[in-house]
């Protein structure tokens, strides 16, 4: 999916401490990702870089975010070569249909995994206390690992149906920047919540 980007942001005082994913939303250079990918960079006024499919680095600024829904919108000013993603519908997906997760798991850019939609409107809580987010998620068994956060979950027509957000670990769900790995249960925010 050429609209998929890698996001590198400040995390815990390290300028390149967080690695996540995102996708180009429109021709204005707006990129969608998870709030937890950029939250530390926003709080600490740290750098956020968006790396496109050609490997070009672009400086980005956060223009909107929701901690509750774990979504953020980044502006990549002056980036004329970014191609917006085609958008689909999570509502129209059926349990058992194929889904494809794009992103940068474990800092491996332009990675793809596939699976099925395992459930729709799955209530998921991630984070703790003030950092908690709540989503009615698409559940998928496409491998979602740390670094996939914010990347697109797509249907077989290449249309984005969700934003990869969390993975299940034994005993709980966790945002994909935690140390857990995929056990075959991942969650994506439906694209309707982004629009």
Image (cartoon, rainbow, N blue to C red):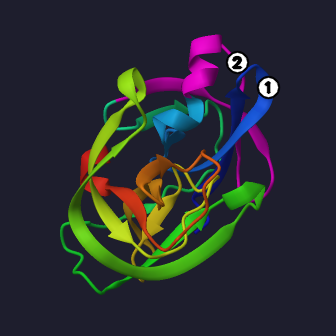
Picture coordinates of residue 52, whole percent (x, y) = 70, 52
Instruction: Name the N-terminal-most of marks 2 and 1.
Output: 1
Which residue is found at the position 39% from the left and 60% from the top?
A: 187
Residue 150 appears at what percent x and percent y?
Answer: 51, 49
Q: How many marks?
A: 2
Name the spot of residue 57 as percent of width and height, x first: 78, 41
On screen, 99 above or below 18?
below
Crowdedness near tag 2: few (<14), some (14–19) or many (≥20) residues, C-alpha within 10 Å: some
The disc at residue 6 is none
Q: Is residue 170 above or below residue 70?
A: below
- Label 1 secondary element: strand
The span shown in magenta is 39-67
Taking the image as drawn, is residue 169 in sight? Answer: yes
Magenta span contains residue 66: yes
State the residue lying farthest toward the top. 44
Tell me the residue at 32%/45% (across/down).
194
User: Mark 2: which secondary structure?
Assistant: loop
**Viewer-closest of 181 and 143:** 181
- Asked if the residues shown at circle 2 and circle 1 are in contact, with their CB atoms under 8 angstroms apart, the answer is yes
Placement of the N terminus among the 4 image quadrants:
bottom right
Taking the spot 65% from the left edge, 49% from the top edge, the residue there is: 179
Question: Which mark, residue 15?
Answer: 1
Mark number, residue 46: 2
Residue farthest front in this picture = 171
Answer whether residue 182 is magenta in the image.
no
Q: Is residue 49 visible in the rendered structure shown here?
A: no
Q: Name the residue: 34% across, 67% down.
A: 139
Q: Is residue 160 left or right of residue 180?
A: left
In the rendered structure, the answer to whether residue 70 lies left or right of residue 89 reads right
Query: Where residue 76 sits: x, y (%)?
Result: 61, 34
Q: CA distance from mark 2 to mark 1?
A: 7 Å
Residue 4 higher or lower than 139, as above or below? above
């Amino acid at each position: 999916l050429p609209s998929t980007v890698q996001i590198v942001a400040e995390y815990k005082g390290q300028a390149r401490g967080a690695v996540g994913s995102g996708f180009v939303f429109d021709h204005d250079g707006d990129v969608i990702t998870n709030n937890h990918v950029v939250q530390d960079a926003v709080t600490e006024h740290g750098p956020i870089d968006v790396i496109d499919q050609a490997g070009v680095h672009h400086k980005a600024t956060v223009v909107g975010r929701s901690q509750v829904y774990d979504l953020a919108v980044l502006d990549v000013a002056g980036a004329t070569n970014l191609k917006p993603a085609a958008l689909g519908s999570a509502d129209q997906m059926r349990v058992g249909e194929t889904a494809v997760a794009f992103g940068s798991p474990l800092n491996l850019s332009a990675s793809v995994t596939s699976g099925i939609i395992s459930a729709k409107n799955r209530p998921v809580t991630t984070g703790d206390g003030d950092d908690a987010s709540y989503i009615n998620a698409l559940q998928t068994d496409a491998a979602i690992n740390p670094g996939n956060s914010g990347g697109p979950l797509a249907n077989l027509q290449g249309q984005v149906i969700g934003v990869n957000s969390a993975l299940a670990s034994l005993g709980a769900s966790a945002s994909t920047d935690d140390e857990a790995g995929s056990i075959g249960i991942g969650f994506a925010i439906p694209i309707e919540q982004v629009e």
